[in-house]
Amino acid sequence: MTDYGVELLAFAPHPDDAELFCGGLLCKLAGQGYRTAVVDVTNGEKASRGTPETRALETAAASRVMGLSVRENLALPDTWVNPWAGYEAKESERIAASAVMRVAEVIRRLRPEIVVAPWERDRHPDHEAASQLITRALMLASVRNVVTDPASTPFMPRQVMYYPMRQLTEPTVIVDVTEAHARKMSAVQCYASQVAQRAAEPPTLVGSPLALPALEARDRFYGSQIGVAYAEPYILRNAVGLGDPVDHFRRNTFSQPLFFPERQ
């Protein structure tokens, strides 16, 4: 039997990405007593607003709101996330220089039952690069002869779920986050340097007056597809097996959906 650590580990390209796009799931599971963790890939130091020091304080506040068990930061260079970083180093130096080995070490150490990662398509290059980085690390973390620093044993999570960010796409599963949605938005509001309306600050997408209403509209839209008030979309690369469909749908039955996605 696999010895799991935390139940859910979410990777975020920048501090606030987890809160914005999978914060409902994190809040919901923490509220149910599960151990949840977030690993930020960068400090967001290139952001047009705020400072790394301010962002660190906001991240700590948001982590408390979400009830996280673990929050870490890999401190990879913001705007320069590279899934192949360190590949050009000499063999003797590659482990220490490799971004993918740092992610693999985290996966092996935290031993998550479920990993949540950004989807492979997005407007921000760091978001796409982080998705590739984490996908590579998930594979390498399971290989016996791949060595990390410190040394660790191979590990593979039970499931990997990808969260779309600004990219609209058809989800594999939609998670009801209605009861956790207010707490999710409270966690997002912790990042005042990014989302607060300040005329003196440079304009940004997340700082737009329409940014948080758009996020709420997105969660309402996906909720409407399963007949609940708020929900978040996730994508799985693998087919999902059901051992007992009757039991599954008895325990996961929602109201009549209001919107139906087109199936090709």
Image (cartoon, rainbow, N blue to C red):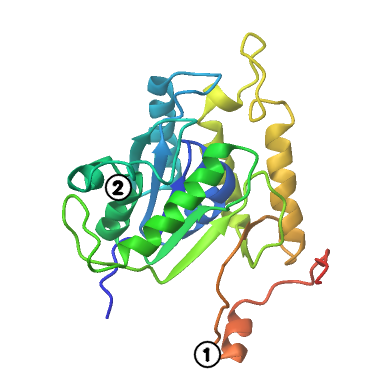
Residue 230 horizontal/vertical position (percent): 68, 55
What's the amino acid at mark 2? Arg
Above or below, 213 relative to 112: above
Residue 24 visible in this rendered orientation of the protein: yes
Along the viewing direction, whichever of 152 and 83 lies nearer the viewer: 83
| Label 2: few (<14), some (14–19) or many (≥20) C-alpha neighbours in 10 Å | some
Tell me the quarter of the image containing the N terminus: bottom left
Location of residue 148 in the rendering, given as x and y in whole percent from the top left corner: 22, 54
Along the line of sight, the residue nearer the viewer: 195 or 158: 158
Q: Does residue 263 appear left or right of residue 140 in this picture?
A: right
View extreme (top): residue: 200
Residue that numbered label 1 is attached to = 243
Amino acid residing under circle 1: Gly
At 32% from the left edge and 67% from the top edge, which residue is drawn?
142
Q: Secondary structure at mark 1?
A: loop
Can you say whether 152 is above or below 188 in the image?
Answer: below
Q: Is residue 143 left or right of residue 21?
A: left
Residue 114 in which image quadrant: bottom left
153 or 17, nearer to the observer: 153
Say if residue 30 shows up in the picture. no
Residue 115, compared with residue 74, is above or below; it is below
Query: Residue 254: image x %, image y %?
Result: 70, 72
Residue at the disc numbered 2? 102
Answer with mark 2 or mark 1, whichever residue precedes in sequence: 2
Q: Report the residue at 21% width, 58% height from top.
A: 147
